[in-house]
Image (cartoon, rainbow, N blue to C red):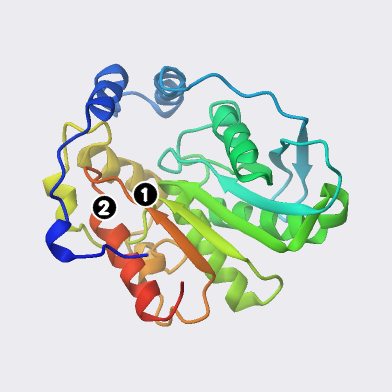
Amino acid sequence: MAPSTETNLHAMTLHPQAALAIEKAGTLPVSLTPPELRRAYVEQRMKMLPPAPRIAVTYELSIPSPDGPIRARFYRAHADTSACPLLVYFHGGGWMLGTLESYDTTCRRLAVKARCAVVSVDYRLSPETRFPGAVHDAYAATLWCVQNAARLGINPASIAVGGDSSGGNLAAVVAQMSLDRAQFRIASQVLIYPATDLSREWPSYERNGSGYMLTSVALRWLIGNYIAQPQDRLDVRASPMLRANFADLPRALIIAAEFDPLVDENEAYAKRLEEAGVP
């Protein structure tokens, strides 16, 4: 999708509910060590969550991969056993933060509202595992879900990938890789304020760089911990914006946040998809 008119871009003011959320959560404290920051992030995130809805089915998964088992969690809101759509979800957190537990409420709500199954993937985090480790995990987990559709009770023709922020980055990359490798087809991609271009800083890095929870300082630090070699930022598995041809990619829902440092590259990615004929 793309903005309807250019004159409407960046014309909004911060919603009072968003302002309250930012006040409660505070700014991401990048002065901490990664383990300390992970604990602080979970505490911060838990303040923001509504009650977790009850669902019919949830269980833990251990997904085999060439790099070792990947922990995941399966959700299905309804007891109906007929094959249903699946959303493979990658959590946000700058490739460094986030857990299955801190995204449990989110995935339950997605399963309930979308009437689909959800598999939440606990991909390896930086700096212990740097690029492209998370990409390998995201792709391997999605491939396993396709290959085990009958076991999961899902329709292999109705599999979507999705995620927020760094998870949106991984979802966009998996959508591209699925087209190139032709091992499976993704029906749609749900990209929630995704990082799409790590090769440069867009103007919104400066415009929205402080005061909105995720700062440009924190974003640079997180990217630096994920990408060890500067040249790797030019790899399309890190910066899906740099893909030459966007034709035939899965249909996309892109959700951008008006005051996010990533909003400009979100709009640019949507425009590239639209120009390539992707719904």
Q: Which residue corresponds to mark 2?
A: 263
Q: Quick one: 22 or 215, which is closer to the camera?
A: 22
Q: Which residue corresponds to mark 1?
A: 193
Indicate the position of residue 248 as horizontal and vertical percent values.
52, 80
Task: Tell me if label 2 and label 1 are in contact, CB under 8 Å.
Answer: yes
Q: Is residue 268 above or below residue 59?
A: below
Rounded to the nearest whole Å, what is the CA distance between mark 2 and mark 1? 7 Å
Q: Relative to residue 213, is residue 89 drawn left or right?
A: right
Secondary structure beneath label 2 = helix
Indicate the position of residue 181 as horizontal and vertical percent values.
64, 76
Indicate the position of residue 4 as horizontal and vertical percent values.
25, 64
Going 61% across and 70% down the picture, which residue do you hit? 178
Indicate the position of residue 94 as horizontal and vertical percent values.
40, 42
Q: Is residue 50 above or below residue 132?
A: above
Instruction: Say which label, 2 or 1, has the lower sequence index.
Output: 1
Say which amino acid is labelled 2.
Val
